[in-house]
Amino acid sequence: MKTLLFILLPVFFLMISCGPAKHELKVMTFNVRFDNPADGENRWEARIPIVRTYMEEAAPDIVGMQEVLVNQIEDLLDIMPGYAYVGTGRDDGRTGGEYSPIYYREDRFNLRDHGQFWLSETPEVPGSRSWDAAITRIVTWAALEDRQSGKTIYAFNTHFDHRGVQARLNSIELMAERITEIAGDKPVITVGDFNIRKESDDYKFMVSTFADRNGLTNAELISEAPVTGAESTFNGFRTDIEPRVIDFIFVDGNFSVSSYRVDEVMENGIFISDHWPVVAEVSYRN
């Protein structure tokens, strides 16, 4: 009996000290650049092997992508085994135009619901565009039940307009409103290419609006580990471009952030994209 007690006591104290599992998640936002043959050596066909290797190594649980054309949707499914996606083309709500898809690991999540809305005065109308937007813009969302924790996460992914100043401001307001309507009090992660520079007044408005309306915080600002590579998220297929941070990951109060980084990936002079992938490792607070 004494021997058994000496064996069990260390195990018991180890269980107490370790506590419950943290259920860590790796989240990514990644503008992959649309399939444009004019990109020359950085054309999509040449970048596919780089994307494949990077995604295998990074292994995100959830990744919001931007500028994905329908043929790239299929290519990404081919090079990312074990992932599924939600999202449709922004031009018609089917396959036309760029997608802002959310890819997720099928072995980690059950898809419970999903949808899409347009950043316009008529959000339910496919292909709609309003204000001073130059191009049709969308938000894709997914309700993902975590097989490990049992929690359901609402993930939102978007790509704001690159020219319309008022369109971006109105998109922030609309997105904040819809996040509340769709997710309620569930955990929320929001990612995207917001086309808003970090040093701008529009960024301050976005941060304050998301914080006040949705409890969202830029994950970079609450990373427990030192942030790496976050001086720029856009490269324009150049190494000499002015630093520009326009891609962000936001999390609400249900998450802590252990690390945040921007991965600068090139191979033999070929860029992974004209944006760098942004990665945050997060955990549920309880």
Image: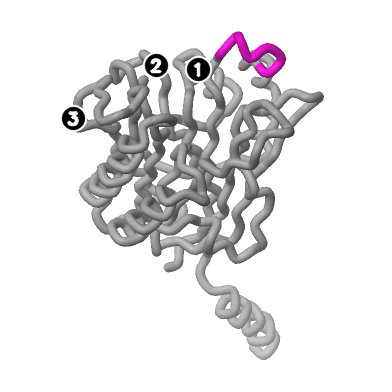
Q: In this picture, is 215 found above or below 142?
A: below
Q: Residue 91 carries which label?
A: none
Q: Position of residue 88 (x, y in %)?
A: 35, 23
Side of 25 relative to 189 (left or right)? right
- For disc 2, the marked residue is 97
Image height check: is 77 above or below 235? Answer: above
The answer, for residue 64, to whether it is visible in the render is yes
Mark nearer the N terminus (2 vs 1):
1
- At which x and y percent is residue 11? 63, 77
User: Element type at marker 1?
Assistant: helix
**Alpha-carbon distance for marks 3 and 1?**
29 Å
Magenta stretch, residue numbers: 36-42
Disc 3 or disc 1, which is closer to the eye? 3
Residue beneath disc 1: 74
Q: Which of 22 and 46 is in front in this view?
A: 46
Q: Nearer the viewer, mark 2 or mark 3?
A: 3
Within 10 Å of disc 1 (Cα), the crowding (few <14, some 14-19, many 20+) is: few
Name the amino acid type tagged 3.
Answer: Thr
Is residue 152 one of those drawn in magenta? no
The image quadrant that residue 118 belongs to is top left
Tell me the crowding category of disc 2: few under 14, some 14 to 19, or many 20 or more residues within 10 angstroms, Cα based.
Answer: some
- Residue farthest bottom in this picture: 2
